[in-house]
Image (cartoon, helix red, strand yellow):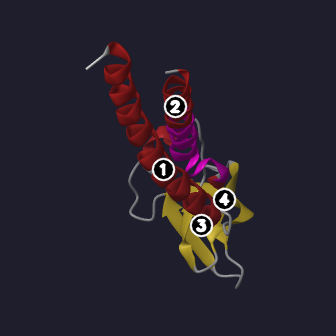
Amino acid sequence: MTTSDAFALVLELITWVGLLPGIVLLAAGYIRKAWASRYQETWGVIVQSPAGTDHLWFRWMDLQRELQSAPVSLDADESLELGDEVKVYFDPRNPENGRLDHPSADGRLMRILGWLLVGVGSAAAIVQIVILLSE
């Protein structure tokens, strides 16, 4: 086995390890992005917890003009005060599930990793073809 044969085997492994998971991650990331695109945006207000605890909640009205409420996530809890207006994103199919973070970031990490892996796998495949043709 020559050095170029060993190099070609390593490149083939990198091609498969890059392309297959990369394509799966890309598909999952774009499906997650499409799923998140149905969220509706509305305004809500920060309120006290219904149980009277120190944890903050937020309230908003859904498309049927029903009042919904949900607890504020712990990472956003420190920067919010009672009575603050916030943008709320909710799913019209499940209006009781609201969130404060913008849904456009859903699946972004999967898409970035997918494109990175597909790029590495494609580059390895191209180098492998160049090595094959240069012999």
Residue drawn at the location 51% of the way across and 51% of the way down? 23
In the rendering, at what x and y percent does residue 106 appear? 57, 52
Q: Residue 46's quadrant in the figure?
A: bottom right
What distance separates the C-alpha of mark 2 from that of mark 3? 28 Å
Label number found at residue 106 = none
Name the front one of labels 1 and 2.
2
Neighbours of disc 3 within 10 Å: few (<14), some (14-19), many (20+): some
Name the front one of labels 3 and 1.
1
Residue drawn at the location 55% of the way across and 60% of the way down? 32
Q: Which residue is mark 2?
A: 120
The numbered mark, 3 or 4, whose residue comes first in the sequence reads 3
Q: Magenta segment range?
A: 104-120
What distance separates the C-alpha of mark 4 from that of mark 1? 28 Å
In the rendering, at what x and y percent does residue 52 appear? 40, 58
* Left or right: where 111 falls relative to 55: right
Which amino acid, by three-letter code, is at mark 4? Answer: Val
What distance separates the C-alpha of mark 1 from that of mark 2? 14 Å
Neighbours of disc 2 within 10 Å: few (<14), some (14-19), many (20+): some
Q: Which residue is mark 1?
A: 25
107 and 52: which is toward the camera: 107
Q: Which residue is mark 3?
A: 35
Can residue 63 be seen at all in this image of the molecule?
Answer: yes
1 and 123: which is toward the camera: 1
Which amino acid, by three-letter code, is at mark 1? Answer: Leu
The numbered mark, 2 or 3, whose residue comes first in the sequence reads 3
The numbered mark, 1 or 2, whose residue comes first in the sequence reads 1
Where 99 sits versus 94, above or below? above
The numbered mark, 3 or 1, whose residue comes first in the sequence reads 1
* Left or right: where 66 falls relative to 57: right
Q: Which residue is mark 4?
A: 88
